[in-house]
Image (spheres, grey):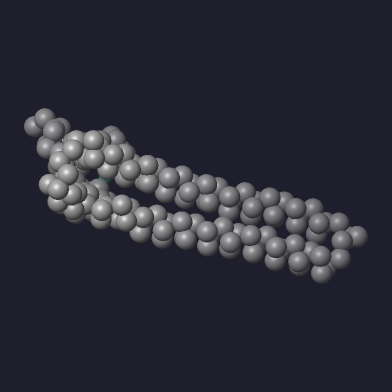
């Protein structure tokens, strides 16, 4: 089982819905995986906040909406990371292919070659910047809805 497979168990673990066997398996993984242990702490903290909210508004629906939200955000955040990394790789790869062609072409001037290189590097930097911005806002976003 990979870390990803433990995510469902983590939700069950937090809600105290696991069988003894599942619980044991999950705790065993936690002991050896700092990443999941850290994530569990994060979720516990969020759960503590939500428990306060559910005391005020004790609706099951609210609780489920809340977890759905978290999953959506995690998925969207991951989607952005994968998308951005792929974008950077494609730009760099495509850029070098293009430049390779242009450098071999003696009719293309040096200035144009330099400008194209700068353009490609600039695009790659922009992608990294957008990626970092997304991750930053995504992190902040995760907590915003919690405080209602
Ligand atoms: Zn793990």
In this rendering, would 107 be left or right of 40?
right
Ligand 1 rendered quadrant:
top left
Residue 130 coordinates in the image, percent (x, y): 52, 59
In this rendering, would 144 be left or right of 40?
right
Give above or below for 4 relative to 110: above
Image quadrant assignment for residue 22: top left
Q: Residue at x 55, y 47 (%)?
A: 86
Q: Residue at x 70, y 66 (%)?
A: 118
Image quadrant assignment for residue 63: top left
Give above or below for 70 relative to 142: above
Residue 102 coordinates in the image, percent (x, y): 81, 57
Give above or below for 125 relative to 72: below
Q: Residue at x 58, y 61 (%)?
A: 126
In this rendering, would 69 be left or right of 109?
left
Let me know if residue 37 appears in the view: no
**Extreme residue toward the bottom, this view:** 111
Name the image quarter holding the N terminus. top left
């Amino acid at each position: 089982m990979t870390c990803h497979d433990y995510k469902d168990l983590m939700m069950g673990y937090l809600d105290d819905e696991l069988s003894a066997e599942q619980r044991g398996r999950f705790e065993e993984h936690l002991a050896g995986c700092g990443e999941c242990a850290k994530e569990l702490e994060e979720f516990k903290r969020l759960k503590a906040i939500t428990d306060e909210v559910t005391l005020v508004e004790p609706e099951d629906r609210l609780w489920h909406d809340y977890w759905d939200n978290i999953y959506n955000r995690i998925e969207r955040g991951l989607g952005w990371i994968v998308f951005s990394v792929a974008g950077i790789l494609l730009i760099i790869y495509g850029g070098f292919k293009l430049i390779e062609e242009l450098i071999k072409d003696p009719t293309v001037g040096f200035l144009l070659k330099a400008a194209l290189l700068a353009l490609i590097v600039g695009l790659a930097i922009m992608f990294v910047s957008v990626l970092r911005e997304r991750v930053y806002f995504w992190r902040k976003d995760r907590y915003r809805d919690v405080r209602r």
